[in-house]
Amino acid sequence: MESAERIIAAPADRIFALLTDPARHCEFDGSGAVRGVRGPTTRLTLGSRFGMSMRKGLPYAMISTVIEYQENRRLAWQTRGPTALGRYVGGRIWRYELQPVDGGTLVQETWDISKESALTKWMVRPQRAATRRNMAATLARIERIVCG
C-alpha cells in the first residue's frame, strides 16, 4: 500500500464533487494514463461502475466499481479488466480520504494492491515509487482545479 497526502485550501464537498465525477478523472490524473471516461458519467455512489480509457504504452480499458463511499469523506474504487477475464486482471483499489483541517481539507490518496490479482500483482508491485510520484501529482492537480 502506498499513499500521498496534501492539505488543499478548499472545502471537502468541492473536492468530493470532483472525485465523484468520472468525466473529470482525466483532468486530475497525475499519471497521464487516464484518457477519458467510457460509458455513463453519472455521479459516483456506492456500487457505481464506470469505465476508463487508459494508455500506458499501449491503449487499454479498465472498469471500476465504487466499494467505499462516505459523502465528503471517503471514496474508493476497485479496478478490473473490462472483459469476462477481467476478474483475473487488476483488483487494485484507489482510495481518497478527506478530513477537514484548519486551512482546508487534508486529502489522502491510497493505492492498495492487497486485492490485486495474482496474475498482475508481480507487474504492479515494482511501480510503487512511480505511483507515489503520480499520486502527489494527482493531489497537486486536484488543488489547482478546486482552488483555481
Image: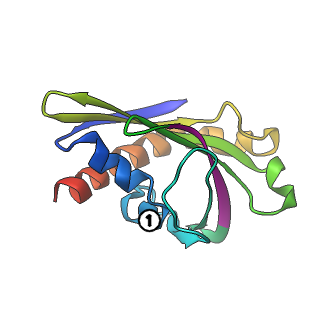
**Residue 119 seen anywhere in this rendered image of the structure:** yes
Q: Is residue 60 left or right of residue 100?
A: right
Residue 73 in the image, given as x and y percentages of width and height = 39, 34
Residue at left 52%, top 53%?
44
Circle 1 is placed at which residue position?
Answer: 26
The stretch in magenta equals 61-69
Residue 67 in the image, given as x and y percentages of width and height = 62, 40
Residue 47 in the image, given as x and y percentages of width and height = 64, 47
Above or below, 69 against 99 in this view is below
Which quadrant of the figure contains the C terminus?
A: bottom left
Residue at left 58%, top 69%?
40
Q: How has the structure been colored for display? A: rainbow
Which quadrant of the figure contains the N terminus?
A: top right
Q: Main secondary structure of the magenta part?
A: strand
Q: Is 11 within the magenta?
A: no
Residue at left 42%, top 49%?
134
Residue at left 24%, top 50%?
143
Residue 30 in the image, given as x and y percentages of width and height = 40, 55
Q: Is residue 15 left or right of residue 23?
A: left
Above or below, 96 against 30 in this view is above
The residue lying toward the viewer, choosing from 73 and 88, is 73
Residue type at mark 1?
Cys
Label 1 CA crowd tier, 10 Å (few <14, some 14–19, many 20+): some
